[in-house]
Image: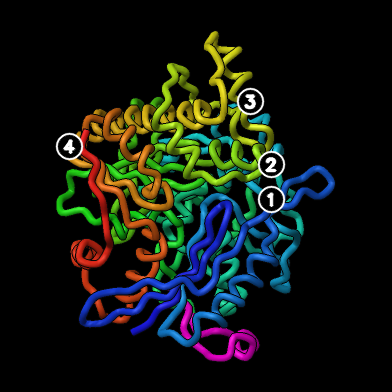
Amino acid sequence: MRFTAVDLGASSGRVMTAEFSAAGVTLSQAHRFPNRPVRVAGTLHWDVLALYRDVLDGLRAAGPAESVGIDSWGVDYGLLDARGALLGNPVHYRDARTEHVTERADPYPVTGLQFLRFNTVNQLLNDDLGRAETLLLIPDLLGYWLSGSAGTERTNASTTGLYDVTRRDWAWDLIAELGLPRRIFRPITEGAAGPLREDVAAEVGYTTAVTKVASHDTASAVVAVPATTGDFAYISCGTWSLVGVELPSPVLTEDSRLANFTNEAGIDGTTRYLRNVMGLWILQECLRAWGDPDLEPLLDAAGRTGTDTVIDPDDPAFLPPGDMPARIAAYCARTGQRAPEGRAQVVRCILQSLALAYQRAIADAVRLSGRRVEVVHLVGGGSRNALLCRLTAEATGLPVVAGPVEATALGNALVQARARGLVGDLAEMRELVRRNAGVRTWEP
């Protein structure tokens, strides 16, 4: 059987096909495209119509499949009016409209969510909701345009700051307390969303079903972690790095809140207990400032150089787009450190700072959850970065298993395959990944 996984990241998107056979599962790329935000009248937006066009192009290129599933980053959303029309291009989480937010609007014992100024709840409190009748998170919005079915998938709902992690539903009392209109929140749904709309089927050349997968990209990536036991930590590494452990229930203690850990929904009732770390965004922005040079020679040079300079990847100065090398230099001046000299040292500084941030996050996850960790699984695009993997093994003192690279698309497809009865529980899905995904282990 064949399934199509639409995987939208913060800097690029891809449409992948997954072929399931007796030999295992094979992933192929049908279409890859950039995800370019656009600034209009001072506000940074996602170009969601361009993304939708690329999704259609990808479905056409991929050809017929049993179903299609969509995952993306969390937090951001589109607002629809009473006719189901989009009220405006979704605002980007890196936009400055929530810069002033310094206190959480959502109570941690209810939402269990890490405080980030751009969480959905903070964005909504800065939005004009007068004409809004429906709120759809990004993968649900695109799924609505494909199928006509409007619902909210659970793993993405859990990133909003408006989801009750204990009751596993919208936090209705909190929504009322904040004065947000109840009408805009669609039911939390799982499984089939319905077939493609007739006009969409005509445009892509076939009809198929839309399946609600684990639509938060990290949730899909964690599905495809090739773990053999529960004693693992994961790092889903791309533009962002999501660092944590998988638990059967949330951790809602005051110590957990103070450590800024988040409890997000995974599949089968699991909790993704993690901390967001800024990730490879800092390196990506440096490369952009340098004119997009080839990364491999820079990584090779960074591996042969050294620097004692360490930055905090989560410092607010590194959140917006812009001249990242200058911001690193300014951070060093502010913290009394010597700025890295040359591009290789800047790259080394970024990667060793990320590795140390990963170490802190894993140590905190162990301390706060009581979960033992014997191995670190690093999945996603960052798993191709050998220097980052080596530095992470050194920083954590644990073996780092790198791969699969396309963990998110693979996890997306696995959930679709399970909906068709091809695979069973989470353990069986991970066994299939282990048999088919090439991985490399870095020892400390």
**What residue is shown with label 2?**
95
Q: Is residue 8 left or right of residue 67?
A: right
Which residue appears at 72% of the width and 66% of the height? 86
**What residue is shown with label 4?**
372
Mark 3: few/some/many CA within 10 Å (<14, 14-19, 20+): some
C-alpha distance separating marks 1 and 3: 24 Å
Mark 2: few/some/many CA within 10 Å (<14, 14-19, 20+): some
Q: Is residue 13 above or below residue 23?
A: above
Which residue appears at 38% of the width and 38% of the height? 388
- Pick whichever of labels 1 and 4 is earlier in the sequence: 1
C-alpha distance separating marks 3 and 2: 18 Å
C-alpha distance separating marks 3 and 4: 37 Å
Name the residue nearer the viewer: 255 or 207.
207
Name the residue nearer the viewer: 14 or 292.
292
| Percent coordinates x, y for residue 239 in the rendering | 51, 46
Mark 1 vs mark 3: in front: 3
Q: How many marks?
A: 4
Kind of residue at disc 3? Arg
Q: In the rendered structure, which segment of residues is drawn in magenta?
A: 194-211
- Pick whichever of labels 1 and 3 is earlier in the sequence: 1
Mark 1: few/some/many CA within 10 Å (<14, 14-19, 20+): many
Name the residue nearer the viewer: 41 or 123.
41
**What residue is shown with label 3?**
327
**Marks 2 and 1 in Cβ contact (< 8 Å):** yes
Kind of residue at disc 2? Asp
| Percent coordinates x, y for residue 354 in the rendering | 42, 32
Which residue appears at 58% of the width and 77% of the height? 146
| Percent coordinates x, y for residue 52 in the rendering | 64, 70
**What residue is shown with label 1?**
91
